[in-house]
Image (cartoon, helix red, strand yellow):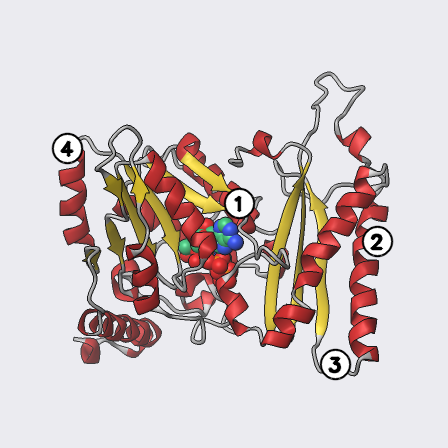
Amino acid sequence: MLATLNSRHRTVANTLAFGREMSTNLTTALPPSSIPIFTAVNSYREWRRKAYGEKKSVGFVATMGALHDGHVSLVRRSLVENDLTVVSIFVNPAQFAPHEDLTTYPRTLAHDLEVLESLKHAVEDSPNVSRSPSALFLPSVYDMYPSGITQDKAAQQGTFVEVKGYSHQMEGSRRPDFFRGVATVVTKLFNVIEPSRTYFGQKDIQQALLLRRMTRDLLLSHPTPESLFIVPTARDSKSNIALSSRNAYLTPAEYNHAAPTLYAALQAAKSSWGSGSTKSQAVTAAHGLVERKVQELLSAQSEIALKLDYIEMNDPDSFEIISDNVTAASWDMPGGAKPRRNRPVILSGAMWVGKTRLIDNIILGDASQLGILS
Ligand SMILES: Nc1ncnc2c1ncn2[C@@H]1O[C@H](COP(=O)(O)OP(=O)(O)OP(=O)(O)O)[C@@H](O)[C@H]1O
Ligand SMILES: CC(C)(CO)[C@@H](O)C(=O)[O-]
Ligand code: BAL
């Protein structure tokens, strides 16, 4: 059938072919699993219909796989709060720019299944009942993009979701089409999974807040904006590095000697802000910490290349950069008509360690005002 498509469709045909190949690989190479794996939308839908029939709530965690304890914290939350928990693994081509790491992104399905199979949550007041992940949704590229998908945005065909006005700041300033890719795939995932509740990580704070806005704007019922929960960032207990699938790209030396710098820089800004500095001074404090680390690596003749991408402070409602002269006290708008005690600010950053781009953030002020769970 692909051979009959004309040249106008070549790009799409290529990606459809890619999707089919992935689909075949998936079904032939599935590791044994005690968790039901749905690789097709229709078979998942049958399962979901049964859950509706039995009036069971379905919690949902969307992932790109290479599972770590950050993902596990989301799944655990879902196990506590829902009768059933569905996890998806899908490395979404539409959110990767052509120069980014789609082909090398870690794919560790056998490990991921082991992680999911090991999770058990004892149900309160029912000593003999425990909950484990109920299903894994593992679609092919072809299933998720029936019109095909290419990373060349100008050649893309079909339907895409854009959250206008909220996709160009922070991470969007560095990855211009990233949130369009995320919003598109998550809309599709929500349409299939129909979650009662869903869980996203604070590590990707702009993503989580933007998706909540999207559920509101699209008047979604599964999930509603109120049933999209944000789970705090899980960190390495010694170094405080935010857990991330891309940490697997780091060499041990990069991980130990350079990666902790991002969180340390955020802490330097936090402490400066907390002692009454302006935003500009707080961000300068963070830059200073990174610069000192870079100098230290140079003096030690280390081969590690450390480069700050950005550190900024943004309004969590608009995602706009807050003004240079704002302080924690003035951010609360004390003289305004509606003072906001402990008004939250997103302090976030990205840093290159060698060829790996790391991101992190902390919320200054009251994170619960953003619906971030504690
Ligand atoms: N350290 C973490 N703590 C809490 N949630 C996390 C953490 N890392 C990832 N998540 C969340 O897990 C979900 C799936 O993320 P994803 O599969 O992209 O993993 P990732 O580690 O963020 O990968 P990457 O390295 O590509 O950023 C997202 O909601 C993400 O925010
Ligand atoms: C939400 C998501 C699964 C969409 O591909 C991805 O962006 C991620 O894992 O954070
Ligand atoms: N967790 C964010 C996924 C990405 O960077 O593509």
x 70%, y 76%: residue: 305
Per the image, label 3 sits on a secondary structure element best described as loop
Residue 164 is tagged as: 1
Mark 4 or 2, closer to the camera: 4
Instruction: Indicate the quadrant of ligand 2 in the picture.
Output: bottom left
Q: For residue 22, what is the image quadrant? A: bottom left
Q: Are marks 3 and 4 in contact (CB under 8 Å)?
A: no
The nearer-to-camera label among 1 and 2 is 2
Q: Dividing the picture into quarters, in which one does residue 194 lie? A: top left
Residue 60 seen in the current view:
yes
Amino acid bearing label 3 = Ser
Rounded to the nearest angstrom, the CA distance separating label 4 from label 2 is 56 Å
First reached walking from the N terminus: tag 2 or tag 3: 2
The residue indicated by pointer 3 is 302
Which residue position holds label 2? 284
Mark 1 / mark 2, whichever is N-terminal: 1
Q: CA distance from mark 3 to mark 4?
A: 60 Å
Kindly identify which residue carries mark 4. Answer: 54
| Contact (Cβ within 8 Å) of mark 3 with mark 1 | no
Q: Position of residue 275 (x, y in %)?
A: 84, 38
Residue 160 shows up from this direction: no
Q: How far apart are the alpha carbons under marks 4 and 1?
A: 38 Å
Whether pointer 4 and pointer 2 mark residues with C-beta atoms closer than 8 Å, the reply is no
